[in-house]
Amino acid sequence: MKTEQPTVSVGIMSAYQNIHIDFRGEYLINGQWITYGHNMVDVNSDKLTFCVNAINDSYFDEMIFEPQSDDCEFTLRNVTIGVSFHWRRKENQTFKGALKLINHGFQIIAINIIPVEDYLTSVISSEMSAKASMELLKAHAVISRSWLLAQMQKPAPEGTEGSDVLGEHAPVIKAAADTDEELIRWWDRDDHVDFDVCADDHCQRYQGITRASTPAVEEAIKATWGEVLTYDGELCDARFSKSCGGVMEEFENCWQDEHHPYLVARSDSEHPDQFPDLSREAEAEEWILSSPGAFCNTADKEILSQVLNDYDQETADFYRWRVEYTQEELSALIAKRTGEDYGRIRDLQPVARGTSGRLYKMRIVGEKRDKVIGKELAIRYALSETALYSSAFVVERHDIDADGYPAKFVLRGAGWGHGVGLCQIGAAVMGARGYDYKQILLHYFPGAEIEKQY
């Protein structure tokens, strides 16, 4: 049994020319120099150059800035958040703990090294509002801790030299099956080798102390200190998303073909075993085009504000949504996002749906080629400039010409995110209805147990 909490290394950002850092408090640099105030680090030849007041002081292969007191903090400028999502933007972010900079192919990567429980305090405030109910905060603390420690236990992928997910880059492809007829790919955090996890939605949102925490968040961390979800003695890979859309998705339909007994189809309701077979097209269509009862089917602004930060609230619809494209818009979008010219798009056809109605295989029927793509995130990337809300949608074709080509496509969909594991909006509703955090966790992770890790 562990008696001390571990530390985690979090990839925050990367830059090709320089990184601007503001230090408050005294920091030791590679065990030698103390610095504070504004500093800049850039890449000079194959070395990192530490600049103080525009003077190049020293050259390093890597740099570690270690705080000399608990009051120390540093700010990284122009950190990209929401990589590949519709609310993507840059902001300045402030952090506690140590800062590590490495040179990876003339690209500076900034890594925050921090105790796990301090990391979790930020994650909970970044993934949702720090004003969330105590039971929701506790539940999220346990799943975020479980997911993190499970990822840290995984070995780095062999033959991989580094990660490209930070800054301006979309997540790196984890694996792919690519033929002329089919392209099936997915993404996962195993791409990281220079750090344990990244700071964006590709892993878990971590924004240091930029998102204001509250005494309630700190209380939730303290109350669940070291608690994790396990199944058959192993740490659970505890996934979560904003809204499952009414039924939870299975792990293998989003990532590698590996079944987890605690990440299975469940209705997000008081009757979790009662739901239609959404892998069948007729039932999926009826489900998506209706608005069946579920915990996550809510428009309660007070509850939604518990889960959604300011930029998340820019999205108006979570449970059911609608997206419309003209023929020209969709054809150009798919060509841009897939890198293949399909010509005019005739149809988007469902090939395989998961337990939540999410497509994990879809056929693009074009004037120049037909191809099946998947899994769910690849479909979402192909049909949006950033990422479609989810892959649980049906396609309506309007104003079809004599050659069978529609003038307009309307996608009507359900949920936000992959839908696997905990549904954040549903969990918020459960908390508001009086469920405690253990009941919330076991609703979304059936058969799991809650245990102390340290």
Image (cartoon, rainbow, N blue to C red):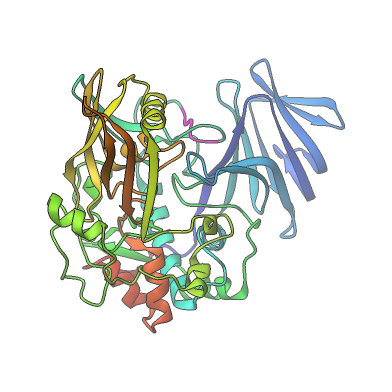
Q: From the viewer's perspective, is residue 129 above or below residue 158?
A: below
- 59 vs 402, left or right, is right
At horizontal 72% and vertical 48% (from top left) the residue drawn is 74
Q: Is residue 15 left or right of residue 117?
A: right
Residue at the (51%, 40%) spot, across then down? 83
Residue 241 in the image: above or below residue 387: below
The quarter in which the C terminus is drawn is bottom left
Which residue appears farthest toward the top when viewing the image? 45
Identify the image quadrant of the N terminus: bottom left
Would you place residue 201 above or below residue 47 in this image?
below
| Residue drawn at x 79%, y 37% as measured from the top left | 39
Residue 193: percent from left, percent from top:
45, 35
Taking the view exactly as shown, the residue that stands out farthest to the front is 402
Main structural element of the magenta stretch: helix, strand or loop?
A: loop
Q: Quadrant of residue 21?
A: top right
- Measuring from the top left, give residue 88's x and y in whole percent: 55, 43
- Judge by depth and name the residue closer to the eye, 383 or 239: 383
Q: In the image, is 115 to the left or to the right of 143?
A: right
Residue 378: x, y in percent? Answer: 33, 36
In-front residue for pair 312/291 = 291
The span shown in magenta is: 162-166
Residue 56 appears left or right of 417: right
Q: Where does the image place residue 272, in percent across and percent down from the top left?
A: 21, 71
Whether residue 258 is visible? yes
